[in-house]
Image (cartoon, rainbow, N blue to C red):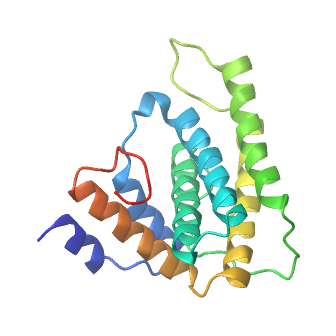
Amino acid sequence: MTLKEKYMESKVINYASYEALAITTKCYSDKVALPYVTLGLCGELGEFYEKLKQEADDQSTVAEFQDILWYLAAIRIEFSLKEIIDWPKPSDKEVGPFDLPSSVGKIAEQIKKYLRDDWKEDQEISLSEERKEKIQSAWNEVMQIMVDINDRVFDLTMNQQGQQNIEKLASRKQRNVIHGSGDNR
């Protein structure tokens, strides 16, 4: 059985199942996990907004949306944030154009401060509880905004978004192109 077939047999039935499958495609060192996943989230957010600005085709925009979900899963794991089982329910809150980048920026700001104030080269990475709480709060905001955007913009459930993302990443991993760049790997 190929890796892609294995993943296609593994169904995304909730957030926890998506996260468990997503992290198996991890391709970075634990030594750089916190800055890597934070920068990855920021980069994917930029690419998502670029696709929106360009009025790119739906599939390109969906792919960037799904990449943000992957980095959210990696952040939840790498930062040892509170585990969640189900995707949040869509809210009635209006989503403005600056809500998502503002909330992602809160995560990046905490990692910047960690690297500046707390990081020691000879010590294992360890976030203070206060910093972790701030990251958790921002992570929750980002996840809720993503669910709200999905509910209003895309014709896919969150489970479908996750499944498509897993299948794309499994295919890239199997073809050994997960380290490259570009949408068409």
The quadrant in which the C terminus is found is bottom left
Task: From the viewer's perspective, tell me whether residue 92 is left or right of residue 90.
Answer: right
Establish if 26 lies above or below 154: above
Q: How many marks?
A: 0
The quadrant in which the N terminus is found is bottom left
Q: Nearer the viewer, residue 116 or 122?
A: 116
Task: From the viewer's perspective, tell me whether residue 152 is left or right of residue 155.
Answer: right
Establish if 27 lies above or below 62: above
Task: From the viewer's perspective, tell me whether residue 23 is left or right of residue 54.
Answer: left
Q: Nearer the viewer, residue 144 or 129?
A: 144
Q: Position of residue 67 (x, y in %)?
A: 52, 59
The answer to whether any part of residue 147 appears in the image is yes
Residue at horizontal 63 percent and vertical 62 percent from the top: 51
Query: Where on the picture, by quarter, is residue 150?
Result: bottom right
Residue at horizontal 14 percent and vertical 68 percent from the top: 2
Q: Nearer the viewer, residue 157 or 179?
A: 179
The answer to whether any part of residue 14 appears in the image is no
Q: In this view, which residue lies farthest toward the top?
A: 122
Q: Position of residue 170 (x, y in %)?
A: 30, 63
Q: In this view, which residue lies farthest toward the front?
A: 54
Q: Position of residue 26 (x, y in %)?
A: 38, 48
Q: In this view, which residue lies farthest toward the bottom?
A: 155
Residue at horizontal 56 percent and vertical 71 percent from the top: 62
Query: Where on the picture, by quarter, is residue 184?
Result: bottom left
Query: Where on the picture, by quarter, is residue 108?
Result: top right
Residue at horizontal 35 percent and vertical 44 percent from the top: 179
Q: Nearer the viewer, residue 84 or 51?
A: 51
Q: Position of residue 68 (x, y in %)?
A: 58, 58
Establish if 46 lies above or below 163: above
Establish if 139 lies above or below 122: below
